[in-house]
Image: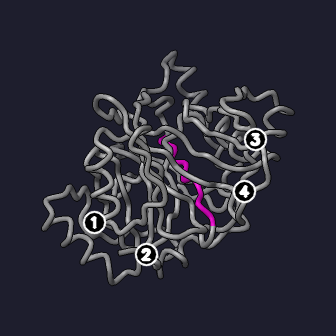
Amino acid sequence: MTMATRRALHFVFKVGNRFQTACFFRDVLGMKILRHEEFEEGCKAACNGPYDGKWSKTMVGFGPEDDHFVAELTYNYGIGHYRLGNDFMGITLASSQAVSNARKLEWPLSEVTEGVFETEAPGGYKFYLQNRSPPQSDPVLKVTLAVSDLQKSLNYWSNLLGMKIYEKDEEKQRALLGYADNQCKLELQGIKGTVDHAAAFGRIAFSCPQKELPDLEDLMKSENQKILTPLVSLDTPGKATVQVVILADPDGHEICFVGDEAFRELSKMDPEGNRLLDDAMVADKSDEWFARQNKSKASG
């Protein structure tokens, strides 16, 4: 079964240095700030990780989330660094512009195969830049996650979550899945040993018609799969309220399913997003405060 009405939306990154991260996504990759929001306390669905304090969310992408796969950058004030695990293996995008931006800005690049360059976002998150024009309207091609048992993961993502298997290579222990040909794909890469999410663990988000959310939760319960956050409504001040269910796959990768109708409303591009992010970065005196106290920011 394929779920034509489901969409890949975004991947959530925890960022310790908001300024350097904004520079990477805006100036190197060439993404736009789609919206920026500040929150006084932690999220009910732990969008910002297991932290209670003030945090911000910045959505960045090559275009609106209606038809682009984007990044959600969550910044917890007071946390300067997150220990990386082996769970997130990279995002691949096709953009000769990003390659040329990286060269111009002297952002480190290393060619891993012909025409494909590996680079890192601040915090150590890997990105693979294909030096070519995007084959589709969205340059973001795939997100690669590590799995400890490919067959078990394929059963989960394909049989339970309804993703179509586009490619499968037993020898290389990898598979490519997606909800539609023109959407960003999910690549599962088998690794030896266990998947370690450490403190930097991210989350991948998809949307589905809101009426499917209770059924999805019931299916996971009946299959004895992990539900991290049962169906809950999330408020964003002045914006649409969305319903979400947060799941975990057999390796503990966090998966958010959000009701599509309200999310399309919430995810509308905010023309003020860029200014709101810049203003928040100027107003953020947390680095200076820690320096004055002769302390360093906490590690996540």
Principal SS element in the magenta part? Answer: strand
Real-space Cα distance between discs 1 and 2?
27 Å
Within the magenta stretch, is there residue 115?
no
Query: x, y percentage for residue 4?
Result: 46, 78
Q: Quadrant of the N terminus?
A: bottom left
Q: Nearer the viewer, mark 1 or mark 4?
A: 1
Q: Nearer the viewer, mark 4 or mark 3?
A: 3
Q: Is mark 4 on a helix, strand or loop?
A: strand
Instruction: Residue at 32%, 35% (x, y): give it.
Output: 195
Q: Is mark 3 on a helix, strand or loop?
A: helix
Read off the residue under disc 2.
Answer: 241
User: What amino acid type is highlighted by mark number 1?
Assistant: Leu
Read off the residue under disc 3.
Answer: 28
Within the magenta stretch, is there residue 69?
yes
In the rendered image, the vertical position of residue 141 relative to residue 146, given as above or below: below
Real-space Cα distance between discs 3 and 2?
33 Å
- Which comes before the other along the chain, label 1 or label 3? 3
Q: Quadrant of residue 133?
A: bottom right
Q: Which of marks 3 and 2 is in front?
A: 3
Which contiguous range is marked in magenta?
68-76
Real-space Cα distance between discs 2 and 4?
24 Å
Read off the residue under disc 1.
Answer: 160
Classed neighbour count for the residue bearing mark 1: other residues with Cα under 10 Å, few (<14), some (14–19), many (≥20): some
Q: In which quarter of the image is residue 32?
A: bottom right
Query: x, y percentage for residue 78?
Result: 47, 34
Q: Which of 11 and 58 is in front in this view?
A: 11
- Which comes before the other along the chain, label 1 or label 2? 1
Colour scheme of this structure image? one colour
Read off the residue under disc 4.
Answer: 32
Real-space Cα distance between discs 4 and 3?
11 Å
